[in-house]
Amino acid sequence: MARKSLAGKLKLFLLITVAFLLIVYYIGLPMYARKMDASINRTTNSSSYQVSEAAQKLHDSLIVADLHADTLLWNRNFLEKNDYGLVDLPRMQKGNLSLQAFTIVSKAPKSLNIHKNTADTDQVTLLILAQHWPLKSLFSLKERALFQSHKLHKYADKSKGQFVIIKTKSDLDGFLTTRETGSKLTAGFLGIEGAHVLEGDIANVKAMYDAGFRMMAATHFFDNELGGSAHGINLGGLTDFGHQVFQDMQQRGMLIDIAHASPAMIDDILALTTTPIVSSHTGVRGTCDNQRNLSDDQLTGIALRVGLVGLGLWEVAVCDSSVEAIVTAIKYTVDLVGVDHVGLGSDYDGAIQPPFDASGMALITEELMKQGFSEQDIRKIMGGNTIRVLSQILPD
Ligand SMILES: [Zn+2]
């Protein structure tokens, strides 16, 4: 009798434990992920982004391109208008954000900071568990990249022709030709934030290319097999493996991104490259002096290779959370290296709090007008330069 009641108690305990775990997995963890997304990816200003009639008219005639958004890290449905986060298709359409780089994050250390981080911890693993990504992406950085590429392809398929992914020069030409007819077709291309997704295997450059990726940054917040991060421990230069990776990327038609690289790594990449490179999301030390931002010499090095910097929209990039500060950084860079080397790199959905989301891009156009930029220069900064670099780099 006593044995039976003990068995009954054990059974009840097991049932309660399983029920508890199921509730945590199916309700608690997704709520945690959603709450995290909503709290770290938000604007500092929730107004409806009114601009002057002249600014709106010019803005509506532009191709607006942005070099960096971490949107795919989150389970938010890209095809629907969300009341949290910073990028989705309806908000891209509203803000005439015509071409967005979707850059995947695969690993992010705990207590992330711009000074010193190791690769020992990771916040993305819990996020993956909480968002019910495929089991194999829990254990592999490569799988995390492939799954995010798969997500964007699925969105494109389900967008009913409203959103396309650009992988070749002819994709880009087709997109631009369609836009010339007055269509509001919106496009994206895939990038990688930190080449640790290669898991140290050169063959994985091809795997990433085959999955549609056309831009890759060497490092993110920690040192990896390619070399030193600007926020890592060793601040090292490019390793032999890093050399191989970038040579392979150049041959395939993939854009090299120096964002988050250590100064030594940036010097090595500049010495190595024969094609235009970008810093997909950055500030400049001339207006905001910190370890995250590029020096005048680094900006000059990128410009000499006919490259491009995507100016960021967040506080560590521009030392303020105003549209004026963003355009002041743009103006500083244009004055230093010329208008052909400056674009946008919002870092939307990358745990930043900018003054506006994707629907408010016209605010930049208006502020560029206020700060005296010509229409021709505004066209280049808002997207023309990014289109030029992509058309030089992408495969046929
Ligand atoms: Zn970043």
Image (cartoon, rainbow, N blue to C red):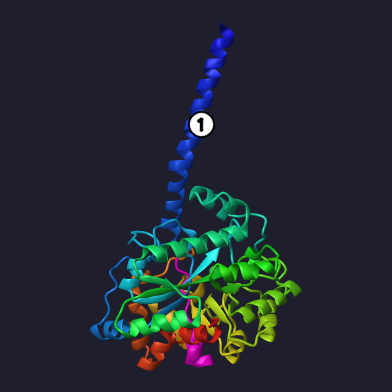
From this viewpoint, which residue is outermost toward the left?
Answer: 53
Q: Residue at x 39, y 88 (%)?
A: 379
Q: Nearer the viewer, residue 91 or 329?
A: 91
Would you identify the image quadrant in which residue 331 lies? bottom left
Q: Position of residue 340 (x, y in %)?
A: 49, 91
Q: Height in image: 283 above or below 296? A: above
Please report the bounds of the magenta region as a residue range.
332-349
Residue at 67 percent across and 55 percent down: it is 120
How far across and down, in percent of the image, does residue 214 sit?
55, 75
Q: Residue furthest right?
A: 240
| In magenta segment, residue 61 | no
Q: Quadrant of residue 47?
A: bottom left
Is residue 356 visible in the rendered structure shown here? no
Answer with left or right where residue 246 lies relative to residue 329. right
Q: Position of residue 352 (x, y in %)?
A: 46, 65
Identify the residue under disc 1: 18
- Kind of element beneath mark 1: helix
Q: Quadrant of ligand 1?
A: bottom right
Q: Is residue 45 above or below residue 270?
A: above
